């Protein structure tokens, strides 16, 4: 009996110290669902517009080399601005203010550097003889881009997209400081109240979202990548 009592006490102490966030999630389930939904939809919205905007920019600078250094410079400057500062700048702009619009625009700018750079690198990684072979077959510049360069560049482009998704999922927590009701609130309030359970709950769910999105993108990448480029 003494042995089993000791085991039970150990498990209770372990649960209180390390797994108490599970009880917190159960108690605050409705709020957890609301914040998770808001966090997830913010990331999806940001990635939707980032894919359209930054892949286009990456393709553009791969054609016009003089624009590449300028684009990389702008992306690097935006990337090193502290997130809370960038969010703060956007809320001071008329018609934006507190809330999702400011958060989304700031996160889209953060997505610029990894996505543009990887699109550019991916297109430039296509060897010149392959492009010349396409021209020799009578393919136009547009056909070469969409039928040769982009398909070959997919692994590098997707690497940038996957890094961006994980990064944006994490940085999105800071948007709670400008009125976004997402999982960052658990982390922020947990720090203010010295509640480890709140902090861990927010961090764990954010991590699960990032892992899930990265997994889904990995499956999509595998499906659309040319068989000859797949790494088995």
Image (cartoon, helix red, strand yellow):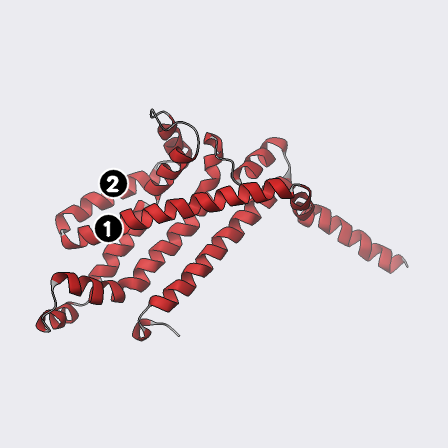
Q: Percent x, y for residue 63?
A: 15, 54
| Above or below: residue 94 compared with residue 191 | above
Q: In which quarter of the image is the C terminus?
A: bottom left
Q: Distance of mark 2 from mark 1, alpha carbons? A: 16 Å
Marks 2 and 1 in Cβ contact (< 8 Å): no
Instruction: Rate crowding at label 1 as few (under 14), some (14 to 19) or many (20 or more) other CA atoms within 10 Å.
Output: some
Quadrant location of residue 118?
bottom left
Q: How many labels does the image show?
A: 2
Q: Nearer the viewer, residue 171 or 144?
A: 144
Q: Percent x, y for residue 181?
A: 51, 36
Instruction: Rate crowding at label 2 as few (under 14), some (14 to 19) or many (20 or more) other CA atoms within 10 Å.
Output: few
Q: Is 90 left or right of 7, judged from the image as shown?
A: left
Q: In which quarter of the image is the N terminus?
A: bottom right
Q: State the residue position of label 1.
A: 56
Q: Circle 2 sits in a helix, a strand or a loop, which is it?
A: helix
Q: Percent x, y for residue 37?
A: 52, 45
| Above or below: residue 37 compared with residue 127 | above
Q: State the residue position of label 2.
A: 74
| Above or below: residue 88 compared with residue 146 | above
Residue at x-position 60% and y-position 36%: 190
Q: Nearer the viewer, residue 210 or 5?
A: 210
Residue at x-position 72% and y-position 46%: 16
Q: Is 133 left or right of 110, judged from the image as shown?
A: left
| Above or below: residue 178 compared with residue 69 | above
Q: Nearer the viewer, mark 2 or mark 1?
A: 1
Q: Which residue lies furthest to the right in this view?
A: 1
Q: Nearer the viewer, residue 232 or 51?
A: 51
């Amino acid at each position: 009996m003494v042995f089993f009592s000791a085991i039970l006490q150990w498990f209770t102490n372990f649960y209180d110290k390390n797994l108490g966030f599970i009880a917190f999630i159960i108690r605050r389930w409705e709020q957890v669902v609301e914040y998770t939904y808001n966090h997830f939809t913010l990331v999806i919205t940001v990635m939707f517009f980032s894919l359209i905007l930054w892949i286009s920019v990456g393709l553009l600078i791969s054609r016009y080399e003089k624009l590449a250094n300028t684009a990389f410079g702008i992306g690097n400057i935006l990337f090193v601005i502290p997130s809370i500062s960038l969010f703060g700048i956007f809320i001071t702009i008329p018609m934006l203010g507190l809330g999702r619009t400011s958060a989304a625009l700031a996160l889209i700018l953060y997505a610029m550097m990894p996505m543009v750079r990887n699109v550019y690198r991916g297109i430039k990684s296509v060897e010149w003889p392959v492009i010349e072979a396409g021209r020799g077959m009578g393919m136009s510049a547009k056909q070469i881009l969409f039928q040769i360069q982009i398909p070959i560049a997919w692994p590098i482009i997707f690497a940038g997209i996957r890094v961006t998704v994980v990064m944006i999922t994490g940085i999105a927590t800071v948007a709670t400081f400008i009125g976004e009701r997402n999982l960052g609130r658990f982390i922020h309030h947990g720090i203010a109240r010295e509640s480890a359970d709140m902090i861990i709950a927010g961090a764990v769910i954010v991590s699960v979202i990032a892992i899930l999105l990265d997994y889904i993108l990995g499956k999509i990448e595998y499906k659309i990548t040319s068989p000859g480029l797949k790494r088995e």
